[in-house]
Amino acid sequence: MTNFTTFDYTEEDLENPTGRNSLGSRAMFFQRSLYKEVIYPTTCEPCSVVSGALAAPQPLPAPLDTWYDKGLYGKVDINQNIIVPDTSWLRQIGNAVSTNIFVLHPVAVMFDAFVEHVNRAQIMGAIDSQGNPKLYKLAAVKGWEDSQVVYNKYQMLKADAFIKNMSKRQKRTIQNFSTFLQEYKPYLRGVATDLPVTRANILLSKQVSLFASGLCIAVGNDPADADANKYDNFLIDENFEFYACAAKKFGFLVNKNMPWILTADVGSNAFKTLWRTRAAIPSTFPYTLKSFFDFYYKPAFENDMSSLVQFLANSYARLVERSPLYDNERILSYSATGELMDRCAGTLSARTPGFRAPPPEFDENLVSYIWPDLLNFYIDLKQIESGNAVTRLKNLRLRAAEVMRSRQDVGAAARGPVLSTLEFINDVYKNYIYSFSYEQVVPSNVSLDIRDRPDILTSIRTAQLIDPDPVDTPTY
């Protein structure tokens, strides 16, 4: 057998991939290497006869590998800004199993065109009707995922872990929102060593799937870890080559590790052409990757501060809801002769409710009264999340404060002082998103199921730093 990158695979290995998350680490490493290196097809079988001889095999369109290469596809733009879709551009997918499946407008339009093409091919007899219907009876089962919902759920797990593990001293001293922050912020700084806290960096983690980009459509809901299912029902299916080639023709890439997921290939000529003709974009509008991301996305940093304030307020509200009373200092009673009479006397008092958190639409005035303390805390989190990437942190703080002061009197059409400061901080730390990205470095034996992952409470206590070597590139 020919030597491959990692192992010498036998014919039996090639025909019977058995990778699953339940395997031991050694078997998992072998099976993931097998799938990564040789299982996914790279050529099409000869399909025509020329001068009496079979035509040479043609290359199969390269898939999108989001496990080992393009893990940040659709999460960052070409300038490494972390981005989120502009939800005003979300559109319902016509060919879907329900009416509440959305993606970005051009992606929906192109998927409809792809489905039309496959339907015509089926009518013309170019489809094997005995194959997997997911490859030719195309219907979206999943589209855009709201990252804010994932963010809120993920963050409150941190709050729950803090509340559950409060010390006796904390239960006594946390009496209002101010004293809560004195205990909660150091806790979050510690958590940020292993788990992101700022919204922008949570978007980079695998807690937020690529569906949050608005570029992905799933036509199946198969288990992502089951290599045998991928091989038997997709990769060797009679219709897979047609499916992959037709997807490329209509501006989509097949996901290498989850072949039932299609992702818009926004840098391809097919996407550019269809974007202009099918999405009815004026010919005067120039298509570049920059213009695409500027048009359909927003920088994630714009909501970083409002999300952080909302999170802090919600965390304290959760504490007040679950533990509305705090223990006063114990009062020790003594007799006239100095004898201790009562060592357990004390009272319970109600915690003061917190302040109203800002709405999703950012209002700078609602956080101004806790500035610059909040700004410094935000910089602390970004610094920790980057692996302490900035060496001259004091200078960064001074420059951020200077940006804040210099933008106090700008016009209404320009960015205000808070957003200008966040933009400045983003411009500094975006250079380090690959040097230390949470859960982006993928060990060869990692569990990579896209379904809901276990509760993070255990992770908060036991997570270890990951290898900081960069592995992801956002090439489009």
Image (cartoon, rainbow, N blue to C red):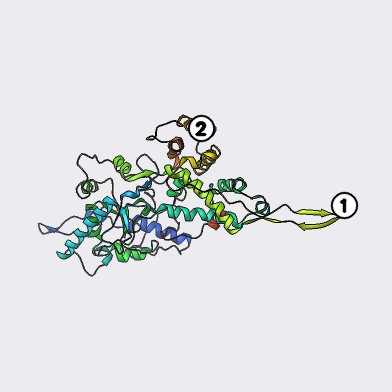
Distance in Å between CA atoms under marks 2 and 1: 56 Å
How far across and down, in percent of the image, does residue 88 sit? 33, 49
The answer to whether residue 159 is left or right of residue 62 is: right
**Residue at the outermost left position:** 51
Between disc 2 and disc 1, the foreground one is: 1
Give me the disc on residue 338. Answer: 1
Task: Please name whichever residue, 140 or 62, is drawn nearer the observer in this view of the structure.
Answer: 140
Counting other residues with Cα less than 10 Å from the Cα at mark 1, is it few (<14), some (14-19), or many (20 or more)?
Answer: few
Task: Please name whichever residue, 167 or 137, is drawn nearer the observer in this view of the structure.
Answer: 167
Q: Residue type at mark 1: give it.
A: Gly
Q: Residue type at mark 2: give it.
A: Ala
Quadrant assignment for the N terminus: bottom left
Whether 30 is drawn above or below 85: the answer is below
Q: Secondary structure at mark 2?
A: helix
**Residue at the outermost bottom position:** 130
Q: How many marks?
A: 2
Q: Quadrant of residue 2?
A: bottom left
Whether 437 is drawn above or below 428: the answer is below
How far across and down, in percent of the image, does residue 54 sit? 15, 58
Residue that carries the numbered disc 2 in the rendered image: 401
Q: Would residue 443 be visible to someone looking at this image?
A: no
Q: Secondary structure at mark 1?
A: loop
The answer to whether residue 221 is left or right of residue 252 is: right
Counting other residues with Cα less than 10 Å from the Cα at mark 2, is it few (<14), some (14-19), or many (20 or more)?
Answer: some
Q: Would residue 412 be visible to someone looking at this image?
A: yes
- Going 17% across and 61% down the picture, which residue do you hit? 121
